[in-house]
Amino acid sequence: MVRITSLAFLSLMLSTSMFPADQAAGQPTAIEAVQVIGIEGTHKNVKGTLQVKDGNLTFASTKGSHDVPISSIQDVVTGKDSQRVIGGTLGTISMLAPYGGGRALSLLRSKIDTLTIEYRDSNGALHGVIFTTPVGKTQALKDELIAQGAHTSIPSKPDQTVATHPQPEPQEKQ
Amino acid sequence: MKHLCQALLLSMLVSVPVSVVAAQPKANPKVADSSAIQVEMVKVGEVEVPAEFQVALYEHLVEEIEKDGAFSRVYRDGDRTAADAQNLIVMHAKITGFKEGSEMARQVTTVSGKTSIAVDCQLTDKNGSLLLEHNINGQVRFFGDNLRATYDFAKKASKAADEALSAYQARPKSGS
């Protein structure tokens, strides 16, 4: 009986972790992001969430939210970068650590993705925004933006499996 | 008594220049009335530059010129309202060199890993007449991430914009 209960509990835990509540309900997924530069009235390096919702790309932070109409986005580009695990003022102070400890700490780095957006406002003025996100989050967001009308100068690479096996679906249908 | 006289004299000497300074108006001498600048998007040219560097150059440039306060209005690339602006200066920038360094290398070795960007800046008037041309370098040698080179460039470029404004104002006024 104990084993059955523990198995049931384990399966319940797995199911909730594999299918988050927002995805199950069909809600747009919000990803964590840091606004590096570009959003007017917002400080640099502000943490928040990025979400595609109601035809807008919304960046929400504790200071407020900012919407960019997807139709006004004329370029979306993703990139890769890395940053210090211990950054900011603490990271600078750590450089003074004795016996090269600060330099050793600077070797500890985490990979990040960058999302760069260019859009025009109602007057036609060009704005650029740079976000950083955890690794592996930006491509899905870029695809979603393009699907909803945003433009890009660097199209996504085609799926390799499709390229090696051209048109598998019509063959199966026949 | 002698000390009292000395103190009185000293206080008078100190108070006089302060009162003179306080009497002057607090207007910023750098601000030129109805002068405006339009910052065009930084062009990449034949150099391969990541998109985030191009955008960071542009955004830092707009931000630094606004912060500098020499122009009463700063227009962005493509802003239709700039067509009505008087005394408009246009800034064109093109990246001519780029070397992406490594923040980790900078912090570990101190002497290597420098990031540098060379940008050719042209400042023209509304009709396209050249006022000033500078090749400006932005770089980060020690602290900060690679994008900090774009901030370094923007600070220098805003000074170039000030020089262009001075050149524009020093030009003889035409009849038209």
Image: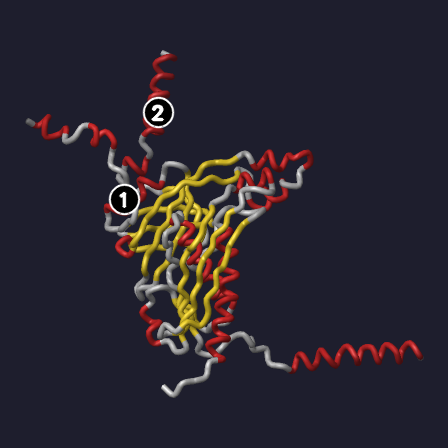
Residue drawn where x is 63% and y is 41% of the image = A95
Outermost residue on the bottom side: it is B175
Judged left or right of residue B73, residue A14 is left
Chain hosting mark 1? A
The residue labelled by disc 1 is: A155
* Residue A7 picture location, percent across and down: 35, 16
Quarter of the image with the C terminus of chain A is: top left
- Vertical arrangement, residue A156 with respect to residue B128, above or below: above
Q: Nearer the viewer, mark 2 or mark 1?
A: 1
Residue drawn where x is 77% and y is 77% of the image = B14
Amino acid at dot 1: Pro
* Residue A172 picture location, percent across and down: 10, 26
The residue lying toward the viewer, choosing from B120 and A58, is B120
Judge the density around disc 2: few (<14), some (14-19), many (≥20) Cα neighbours within 10 Å.
few
The residue lying toward the viewer, choosing from B70 and A63, is B70
Outermost residue on the left side: it is A174
Say yes or no: labels 2 and 1 on the same chain.
Answer: yes
The residue lying toward the viewer, choosing from A159 and A127, is A159
Q: Quadrant of residue B4?
A: bottom right
- Vertical arrangement, residue A63 with respect to residue A174, above or below: below
- Vertical arrangement, residue A87 with respect to residue B56, above or below: above
The residue labelled by disc 2 is: A14
